[in-house]
Amino acid sequence: MRSRALAAVALLLAGLLTGCGGWRDEGRPPRTDDAITIPPQASIVSVPVEADLGNLARAMERQVPRRLWSIDQKDQICVASEKLDLGIAKVKTPKIKCRIVGEVTRGRIAVAGSGQRIRLSIPITAVVRAEDIAGLLKRETATARAMVHADIRLDIARDWTPRGTLDLSYAWTTEPHIEFLGQKIRFTQAAERELAPVVAKLERELPGQLGRLELRRQIEKAWGSAFTSVVLNERNPEVWMRITPRALQYGGYEIAQGRLRLKLGMRALTETYVGHRPRPRKPTRLPPMQPLEAQTGALSFFLPVFGDYRALEPVLIEALRKRSRRPFVVPGLNPVDATFKAATIYGTTGGRIAVGLTFSAHERGSKTPTSGTVWMTAKPVNAEDSRRVGFDQLEVTGTTDMTGGDLILELINAPGVAPMVADLLAQNFERDYAELLGKIDRAIETKRTGDLIIRAELKRAKTGQLQAAGAGLYLPVWASGTASVTIQP
């Protein structure tokens, strides 16, 4: 198919060239200066903001006093009156009053959790003394222990403020009591009267203490730091990806190994630039929370497998010079020797490239050489998801600087010469494509910018239609993978 197309092109060129007898100082295609425009790609980058639950425990240690409350109550009934049947009579024992004195302290607050539950455990120790026991005993001391459990379920408000619902409970591991006159005197009821307001206070204040996790500060830091540019390829050519966050989405949380991890998805635009590093856009304020709509960690970006025209020129001229070691066969003429001096390649209108070949040609036996520049245009093409580049619609547009006749036109028109030029222009981007993906995979595997660490991995890539612009020839590649952004001071 391709050989037939090139043969048709050669026949067309033959008709054009022989019919017109050549162009003199005409036909140089216009040079375009349009840049490679790369459409931004939408991504939802995983932002697993983490918080150490130990921060909450330390905050609680500062906020909740060690001494929770004290007890000092006089004329408390330590032993209630009882009716006793002595056989000969029934008597009623007197109430035994005492003074109950004591204090309740807490131990070290522990924070743990799993799944969706944060659990605070607060050990409580009560030392209760019964004093002036009916004038019979001076003092009896009882030690009691309880464990208060606070199960918290977290929620995030639209302004990224953490909120929580609390399920508070406590259980005595050792009830407060003393042994007196063979009886167990319990102080549980008295102790619970004092414990109740402490529990109520914890219920009121614990949800507010979630701010001590500093989740919003971490989220703001991740948001602001994500406005950055990351190098994808350091040279030949430089390729940069600029990340511009647009929205931040929340999809719940999980607790594991003492850390709380928010499932966040940062919807961002990823723009690819060829050349110097683009200036990151100015960070915007943290936007309101949005519910997570897609799986986090999906990174999409655009990569150009880039062919600089200046890099193609020496390749073409070297190949032509190598071919010119043998004479060219031009119908109706003696063997023709050619000396190729320069190749000029640039982008022109219509998504085409312009190729100018400057050379001189000399028919053996003739003393009149011909020199000048022949100009051609062609459209780069490739099959879907293929890195093999070809050139269609090859057209000769004219010549410039022609001297000594039309021999160089006749040479270009000779059988096989035009197809040869097209073949020399054609190239296979497969190796460049694989090398670029390898470089990018290594470049973004772990990238640190200040306190921000971007971890990414390429998973899939697909090539698009080859394009020609003023800045170069490039093969668009749409790549996708996984990515996360974390804060690590």
Image (tube, rainbow, N blue to C red):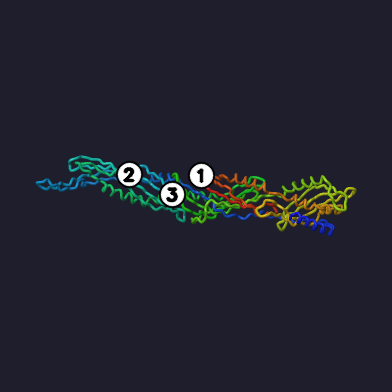
The quadrant in which the N terminus is found is bottom right
- Identify residue for label 1: 488
Q: Is residue 1 left or right of residue 124?
A: right
CA–CA distance in space, label 3 to label 2: 26 Å
Mark number, residue 96 = none
- How far from the left and from the top, in percent, is residue 329? 84, 50
Q: Quadrant of residue 127?
A: top left
Q: Is residue 139 above or below residue 227?
A: above
Q: Residues within 10 Å of mark 2 (few under 14, many from 20)?
A: many
- How far from the left and from the top, in percent, is residue 36? 66, 53
First in sequence, mark 2 or 1: give its number. Answer: 2
Q: Amino acid at mark 3?
A: Gly
Mark number, residue 115 = 3
CA–CA distance in space, label 3 to label 1: 23 Å
- Identify residue for label 2: 124
Local SS, label 2? strand
Q: Amino acid at mark 1?
A: Gln
**Labels 3 & 2 near each other (Cβ < 8 A):** no
Local SS, label 3? loop
Q: Is residue 229 left or right of residue 140?
A: right
Local SS, label 1? loop
Q: Is residue 401 visible?
A: no
Q: Nearer the viewer, mark 3 or mark 1?
A: 3
Q: Amino acid at mark 2?
A: Ile
